[in-house]
Image: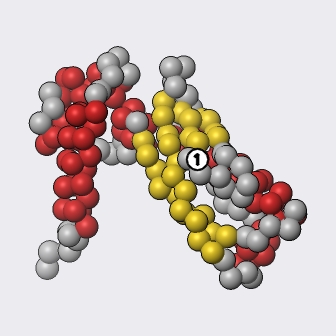
Amino acid sequence: MKWDSLFLSNLKSYKMDKKKVTVTIYRANDGSYWCHTEEDVYGCGLNSVGMSVEESKADLMDGMKEACEDYLAKGGAPYEVSFCYQYDMQSFFDYFSFLNVSEVARQAGINPSLMRQYTSGKKRAGESIYNRLADCMNIITSELQASSLRAHD
């Protein structure tokens, strides 16, 4: 979602405080994806829905723009918002579809077939599985941050 340039230029003219907001993203039983903010943004909690995580995030940005416009119209001081996203397993692998679910499962020490059942919603993973996946993703993140590509001469 791109905000119109007038709206953005108005916000950039202010020296803004920053607020970090946690967004929880999960897949509902009907297959839709929901986002909701754990903290208020511009005076309200935000909720959004879409048929993919990307659509739900775009809907969240639309809601934030509207909330910000209302907040500013009521005399509120603008501030910058940065989001930290928390995903359920289905949402995570929907959004990061380039990750091979089976390979991530192997690296985390989880049966790949069972992992596919978790990501499809046929079975629910417990806290210990989420912890193993979080540890695995932290390792993958560290390895990616320490890596770069270079053309071979």
* Residue 140 in sight here: yes
Q: Residue at x 50, y 43 (%)?
A: 24
Q: Residue at x 72, y 58 (%)?
A: 42
Which residue is identified by label 1? Answer: 37
Q: Residue at x 71, y 49 (%)?
A: 44
As drawn, 43 above or below 82: above
Q: Nearer the viewer, residue 121 or 148?
A: 121
Image coords of residue 149 (percent x, y) = 22, 70
Instruction: Report the quarter where the N terminus lies.
Output: bottom right
* Residue 55 in sight here: no
Kindly indicate the quadrant of the structure image that contains residue 106.
top left
Image coords of residue 58 (percent x, y) = 62, 48
Instruction: Report the quarter where the C terminus lies.
Output: bottom left
Image coords of residue 148 (percent x, y) = 22, 71
Kindly indicate the quadrant of the structure image that contains residue 35.
top right
| Neighbourhood count class around disc 1 (C-alpha, 10 Å): few under 14, some 14–19, many 20 upward | many
